[in-house]
Amino acid sequence: MMSSLGSAVARFALIWWVTKLTGSATVLALATSLTFLPKILIAPFAGVIVDRHSRRLIMIISDAFIALASLWLAYLFWKGSMQIWHVYVVMFARAVGNAFYRPASRASFTLLIPKKQYGRLEGLNLTRSGILEVVGPALGALAIAWFPLHSVMLLDVATAALAIGPLLVFAIPQPAVESTSAGKRNSYMSDFMDGLRYIIGWRSLLIFVGVAAVVNFMLASASGLVPMLVYEGFAGDASMLAWFESLFGIGLIGGGLLLSIWGGGRRRMLVVFGGIAGLGGMLLIPAWTPTSMWFVAVAGFGFLGALFAVTQGSISATLRELVDPAKQGRFYSLFSSLMTASVPLGLMVAGAVADRLGMRFWYALAGITLVLAGSAGLVFPVLRRVENEADASPGLARWG
């Protein structure tokens, strides 16, 4: 948590420095897009390394690599020689470190936490994300007001050191390394293709991943276009935008806390698909709410955040329970790559549709799509079967 908070503060300070120095949306967009590339291009192959080697060591090296990038920034700010291209390099380097750290971390928790606690674990993770969404920018603003930028970057280095410390002391369970029938270790490409076949060959898991991608596509586009919804759809200003974003963050924290206490129940598929339908319903509120009743749409965003936490946490807990621990590095890397790629694609499609047919039209389309997707999951057993297959023999379910 401390490492994530330090990173959030440093990221806020860095983005604000770029914004203030250049005043260019293009430069800012390029800096942000560099954080997506490693997740899309490197992450699928990073998963093979995560499954073959010590996940504990990978987390230590990844966190140390990110900390060194921040240390370099601190030195540049201290010397007064900071330039825009340095930001590009560091943003990309941090994303590369995260491409290894995240799948290693997620796969490690699977073996550390009992299965019945997976829902609570994901609830706590989402609560942490909500807190970072609310607290990170506020602390970042205070940090750059009170301290020079090189000190803010050093804060990120210090919190990373705090995160690495426990990893140097405590052991993390490691699954058995997969090998060929002759007892020899598989090649890297063989392991990668094996992970890909594992997902493609498991029909209901593949469908479930596809549904998650559709949900991410719609929600990412809706989230990215909130400023335009406020400006165009409700004729609002920055203060109204703050209300929308704050209520979503508060809802995210509340939903995460609820899931961390409740755990998601025994039949997670009902929670998942019911939650997806509910998310669609919440997107329909700003699509159909009159301008004069903007506060209703704000309240809807609060419930949207809570439902997102419960639904996303239940999806993550289900996947954690389904996937063979020995393949989770590859699975999470491929899954993250797919989810990340859907974000810019969703924003481009949503932007084009909204420019032509209106912002409210896109929110209505996204809402109806999620309502139909969630309803289909509740009606058709094939979409819920993946949970039953996990109870029988995870990883052995196949087409037919």
Image (cartoon, rainbow, N blue to C red):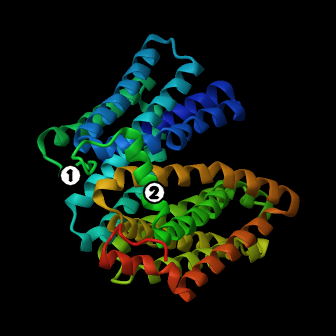
Q: Residue at x 63, y 24 (%)?
A: 21
Q: The disc labelled 1 sits on which kind of residue?
A: Ala
Q: Amino acid at mark 2?
A: Arg
The residue shown at (65%, 54%) is 224
Say the numbered circle drawn on residue 376.
none
Q: Is residue 72 left or right of residue 118?
A: right
* Residue at the (69%, 69%) spot, across then down: 366
Could you say whether the residue bearing mark 2 is in a helix, strand or loop? helix
Q: CA separation, marks 1 and 2?
A: 19 Å
* Relative image position of residue 297 (x, y in whole percent): 66, 72
Q: Is residue 220 visible?
A: yes
For label 1, the crowd category at 10 Å Cα-Cα, with few meaning under 14, some 14 to 19 and many 20 or more, is: few
Question: In the rendered view, does 58 fall on the left or right side of 350?
Answer: left
Q: Choose top left, top right, bottom left or bottom right for residue 212.
A: bottom right
Nearest the camera: 372 or 129? 372
Does residue 213 lie above or below 24 as drawn?
below
